[in-house]
Amino acid sequence: MTSLDFGPLVLGGNTFGWTSDRDESFAVLDAFIAGGGRAIDTADVYSAWVPGNSGGESETILGEWLASRGTRDDVVIGTKVFQHPQRPGLHPDNVRAAVDDSLRRLQTDRIDLYYAHRDDPEVPQEDYVAVFDELVRAGKVRELGASSFEAGRLRSAVDIATREGLTPFTVSQDHYNLVERGIEHDLVPTLQELGIVELPYWSLASGFLTGKYRPGVAVDSQRAEGAGAYLDDPRNVHLLEVLDGIAADLGASVTSISLAWLSAQPTVAAPIASARTVDQLEHLLEVSTVQLDAAQLSALDEASRR
């Protein structure tokens, strides 16, 4: 079981160095902390997909912000290893090198939550479970997470750690939201059994669950194509209508209602969501004040069930 306090929302750092430049990223981070946030998620690969970037840009901006604000002890920092172009996979030597790279970019002496960004079938699980434990024992990492693992592989990794007296995964990070509920079938029961908490990514379905994507409405966004595709399913259009009704009843945003439903699900400690601007952050932080009753949760559950 995790000992980390993530607060009501984990701020996603994938926008830093991508859709948010350094100054915009600093403004979002400042507003997040001022609004009561305390956990930030990034990865060594963010944002290598941007022309001119090489990976590590998000960690670098976050590290500069931590150093300039003196806030390191006030926040929970999570980052990941596997997908950086120069540090691919979970081979022990690569993990050792990657964590030192991340520590340097983040300008810190420890990472609160260090993830395997995905499973690596080419490396024996015993090997990467052992090297992650090594990082914890060295004081470089506090807790360990697994992102996008299949239920069986997550279970076997935890079994190895338990058998060998090594540090187990305590957090899982997976694709989960009102329109993507696939993990409920196998993974969520496994998390419940193992005592692992879930921090869902893509909590707002690339922006679809903010309510700004509607039939016949053009949205200027890097993610418009993916988010807009959800409108092809009439059940998702109906889901927006249900979200609109609950938001109107509570005087809250569709964004916060979507996140509040996710926060109420078994094993979910807090959703992860990113903001390109301070204005976008306002609706994300609203989740801390939204309380859905049983009827509202049931209505959303029914409208989103597939």
Image: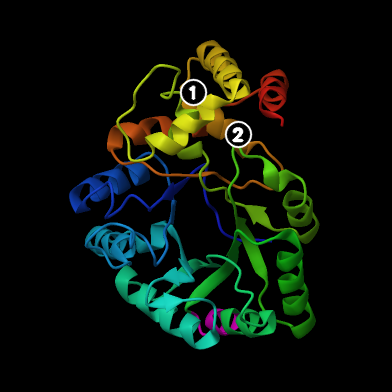
The 10 Å Cα crowd at callout 1, few under 14, some 14 to 19, many 20 or more, is many
Quadrant where the N terminus is found in the figure: bottom right
In the depicted structure, whether residue 11 falls above or below residue 155: above
- Earlier in the chain: of badge 2 and badge 1, it is 2
Residue type marked 1: Val
Disc 2 or disc 1, which is closer to the eye? 2
**Residue beneath label 2, please?**
179
Rounded to the nearest whole Å, what is the CA distance between mark 2 and mark 1? 14 Å
Residue positioned most to the left? 23
Q: Nearer the viewer, residue 30 or 182?
A: 182
**Residue beneath label 1, please?**
254
Highlighted magenta segment, given as a residue range? 133-139
* Element marked by disc 1: helix
Magenta stretch: residue 3 in it? no
Residue type marked 2: Val
Residues tagged 2 and 1 counted as in contact (Cβ below 8 A) = no
The answer to whether residue 146 is seen in the rendering is yes
Residue at the image point whose x is 54% and y is 67% from the top: 115
In the depicted structure, whether residue 214 falls above or below residue 92: above
The image quadrant of residue 262 is top right
The answer to whether residue 285 is seen in the rendering is no
Query: Of helix, strand and loop, which mostly describes the magenta segment?
Result: helix
Q: Position of residue 226 (x, y in %)?
A: 45, 38
Q: Position of residue 36 (x, y in %)?
A: 42, 42
* Element marked by disc 2: loop
Q: Position of residue 219 (x, y in %)?
A: 34, 27
Residue at the image point whose x is 57% and y is 16% from the top: 246
Q: Nearer the viewer, residue 235 or 94?
A: 235
The image quadrant of residue 236 is top right
